[in-house]
Amino acid sequence: MQKLLNDPADVVVEALAGMAAAHPDDLLVDMEQRVVSRRGGPVRGKVGLVSGGGSGHEPLHAGYVGPGMLDAACCGEVFTSPVPDQFVTALRTADGGAGVLHVVKNYTGDVLNAEMAAELLATEDGPQVEIVVTDDDVAVQDSLYTAGRRGVGGTVLLEKVVGAAAEEGRDLSGCAELARDVNARTRSMGVALGPCTVPAAGVPTFELEEGQMELGVGIHGEPGRRRVPLGTAREIAAALVEPVVADLGLRRGDAVVTLLNGMGGTPLLELYLMFNEVRAVLDAAGVTVARSLVGNYITSLEMAGCSVTLLRADDEVVRLWDAPVATPGLRWGA
Amino acid sequence: MQKLLNDPADVVVEALAGMAAAHPDDLLVDMEQRVVSRRGGPVRGKVGLVSGGGSGHEPLHAGYVGPGMLDAACCGEVFTSPVPDQFVTALRTADGGAGVLHVVKNYTGDVLNAEMAAELLATEDGPQVEIVVTDDDVAVQDSLYTAGRRGVGGTVLLEKVVGAAAEEGRDLSGCAELARDVNARTRSMGVALGPCTVPAAGVPTFELEEGQMELGVGIHGEPGRRRVPLGTAREIAAALVEPVVADLGLRRGDAVVTLLNGMGGTPLLELYLMFNEVRAVLDAAGVTVARSLVGNYITSLEMAGCSVTLLRADDEVVRLWDAPVATPGLRWGA
């Protein structure tokens, strides 16, 4: 295993120590509960925004803690849900008195643990919690860890848009409604060109022969739609974008926020090249790119490959997208 | 070769098309000369800042074009110097009437072509050009493509600091003096845990057995100091930081800007973990981290590994570091 590690059992806690050291003015890290929050938070009277999940998808989620996005994030072991106690700590940490919105990617363990945390808080006179589950991956209906569609790149876009609304003072039910609307208008699909290795396992999550790719792969290396011969970037763009466009029901004249996301082990040079092809497919469909992101935003350790996420945009989505954000992973206007 | 590509011969030009599409409001791309510049530039009366080099190191250099950093960058083929004509175009594009500072990483081809471009402009009544060569890599004295030390991660820090000074109105000789000073107070060292593949070659740049690492590797996969058994993150941090601290002559009480840079194929989780170890080595030496960056800032396609760059900081360096910057690869305060 060719990795920068000490004891594989300590990877998450040691990475969190590094994150705390790298962002001393902005982030506070509870090393015991593995909860990252805004320094100086919570913001009184603002709806708190919380997310979390297994580690290995950095910068998601802890890298999106900061003004304009999340108030707190909690970090499970690599590719493993946080336990309910961690979610409870994150939800309490984010509570500024106006309730907390908990964004959960649709994986069975994450959803169960999030629900258990909300129940614990309800019996403990904790903050009011609304859970919104993201399920934007069109690749497969059910998967290794999931009933229903998986939550993937759309989670990043949702956290940005709803984070801006919360910052403006929208109330908890308004934030939850917006989050469900953003999730409903967002779809994703990914492809793997190479696997990743979970440190505690020490072996690749799957095997992929040279010249093959896994179309519709999940962010933990779960199987996708099918394993097919490696195509050109042009063919791959069509294979990723067309199902997303069809599932969203996009029509000529529609506009989208586009995320061209690297899985962690693919060079930025290739990601920009892929974005050029994705935009060409959208152009041909008459769909406008209103805003875009190209880079590593929701990764799978060092997996090679990429995913495409489209969020159907309107003026309100674009306005919230453009609002200031100041986090380690996403920063503009601030 | 498991890559997102069409024809390997077109990778740079197609990636530039994607870059133009991803940053339509900020960047202008001359597809013929492969020169990326600020939209609306050059800035009248400001010293222009130009850099360039082989592609494959993204976001360096084109990703650092924007207010607070570069005015223009030109892009050679992967791991290959731009030709003099490209440098000439970039230097002319960046000229706002106050002369242009050309930052060149120390590789023999880049330096020769940069000097040729400056001579061409001198005979054509072009802008006044000052060349500053970066050579911050302590690993080896001479290398495969270089006489003297190689220019690596220090280039990113220099472009940020000098970009801020140029934005403040410092004149050409003042910018050149500052750039040489920053280069003189900056040192780097890197390690590879896995190779990368240049698209046109189709095979890895080097072979590395499981359980080995290349200490002191160059950003094109050039040989380093020695090939040794893969250490723990703690051991690797010591092996990278101690030679840099010694070469810089850092003493207890000194402060540094620290770049913990990923080579392109290493997960952010591991980079934060490494940063924790690097900081521990600096702590033990009594050296304070005044500012830091952790992430992929000067890459080698999908190479696995990292590098450490230290810039000896004083109040002026920190002030220029904190000044606003708004580029695809580095953004704050704007």
Image (cartoon, coloured by chain):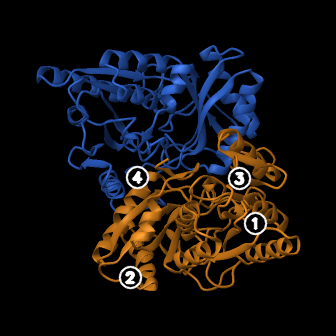
Chain colours: A orange, B blue
Q: Which numbered circle lies on residue B199? A: 4
- Quadrant in the picture for residue B105: top left
Closer to the camera: disc 4 or disc 1? 1
Dot 2 crowding, Cα within 10 Å, few <14, some 14–19, many 20+: some
2 and 1 marks in contact (CB < 8 Å): no
Q: Position of residue A282 (x, y in %)?
A: 34, 73
Q: Which numbered circle lies on residue A37? A: 3
Task: In this rendered view, identify the residue nearer to me: A207 or B326.
Answer: B326
What residue type is disc 3 on?
Ser
Q: Are marks 4 and 1 on the same chain?
A: no
Q: Chain of mark 3?
A: A
Pick whichever of labels 3 and 2 is earlier in the sequence: 3
Q: Chain of mark 2?
A: A
- Quadrant in the picture for residue B235: top right
Closer to the camera: disc 1 or disc 3? 3
1 and 3 marks in contact (CB < 8 Å): no
Residue on which disc 2 sits:
A250
What residue type is disc 2 on?
Leu
Q: Which numbered circle lies on residue A80? A: 1
